Image: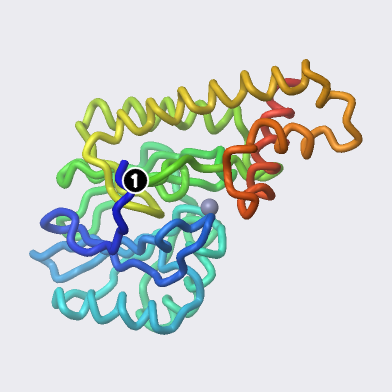
Amino acid sequence: MSDQPWTGGQVTERASVVLCPNPGPMTLDGTNTWVLHSPSTDQAVVIDPGPLDEEHLDAVEAHVAKLGATVELTLVTHAHFDHDEGVPRWIERTGSAVRGAGRGEALRHDERITVGDIDLHVLLTPGHTKDSVSFVWADEQLLLTGDSVLGRGTSIVAYPDGNLAQYLDSLDTLHVAAQEGGLTLAPGHGPTALDASAVIDFYRRHRGERLQQVRDALAGGANTAPDVAQAVVEQVYADVPKAVWPAAKATVLAQLEYLQA
Ligand SMILES: [Zn+2]
């Protein structure tokens, strides 16, 4: 994982990122809008149009036009606004079909989606949110993860919609896919990483460490605090910026739920 600024651009021969200018503590460099290209049929698949930002949608449309393609299908990795809010406007502008995040026909685990010479394998990967999905594009060796795995730092479990037990299972699913395919991480925020399986391994270790820290904080007295989750955040997440403490608290609530289960 790199600390260099990430600006998107061409990632593989047929996959590129138009970076949305919405950087922040939760969105890192901004939302990655992925454009997948089928040159033989002049079609494109767009993943995560991003928030409602006309200039960004202009940039995505211009990029697709530069490829000489039209948008056949838009996929949404999950219903968080920084991925999904711009979708209705995007569909209005492009006339694209749409699936994911409760829009269009529901995505099914292990489903194959084919658009021209783009062949995607759908993985349902709940945990960050209930509706989180990922896509394997085996031909380009890409693992498109939305917010389930990010290009920098770690993701959150957005309790109560998100669920830690599901998230840990999803990391296992993603790890198997990454290892089998030798896949590059193609995240919803932040840079790509050549070895997706190594990043996912780090995520699994990190979640295990955080869980142990939460157990220790509870045993050390956080258990009896008026706001248990807040007391845990202040101890366990002392190392992260306060701007992300609300998100950390959601993850702590998910961890408390997990430990009680
Ligand atoms: Zn999200």
Examine the rendered structure and indicate whether residue 6 appears above or below residue 1. Answer: below
Q: Nearer the viewer, residue 61 or 236?
A: 236
Q: Residues within 10 Å of mark 1 (few under 14, many from 20)?
A: many
Q: Position of residue 221 (x, y in %)?
A: 83, 21
Q: Of 110 and 63, which appears nearest the observer?
A: 63
The residue that label 1 is drawn on is: 135
Q: Measuring from the top left, give residue 183's x and y in whole percent.
A: 23, 37
Asked if one can make out residue 205 in the rendered structure from this viewpoint, the answer is yes
Q: Quadrant of the N terminus?
A: top left
The quarter of the rendered structure image containing the C terminus is top right
At x 88% / y 31%, what residue is drawn? 225
From the viewer's perspective, is residue 167 above or below residue 259? below
- 249 sits to left or right of 231: left
At 50% from the left and 76% from the top, the residue drawn is 52
* Residue name at image x 38 percent, y 78 percent: 57
Compared across the picture, whether 174 is left or right of 157 comes to left
Quadrant location of residue 8?
bottom left
Question: Does the numbered disc 1 mark a residue whose Cβ is under 8 Å from ligand 1?
Answer: no
Q: Quadrant of residue 117?
A: bottom left
Residue at image point 50% right, 42% down: 155
How many numbered callouts?
1
Disc 1 secondary structure class: strand
Q: Position of residue 230 (x, y in %)?
A: 78, 39
Q: Is residue 112 visible?
A: no
- Which residue is situated farthest in the front direction here? 239
**Amino acid at the residue labelled 1:** Phe
Q: Nearer the viewer, residue 86 or 253?
A: 253
Q: Position of residue 44 (x, y in %)?
A: 24, 67
Judged left or right of residue 8, residue 84 is right
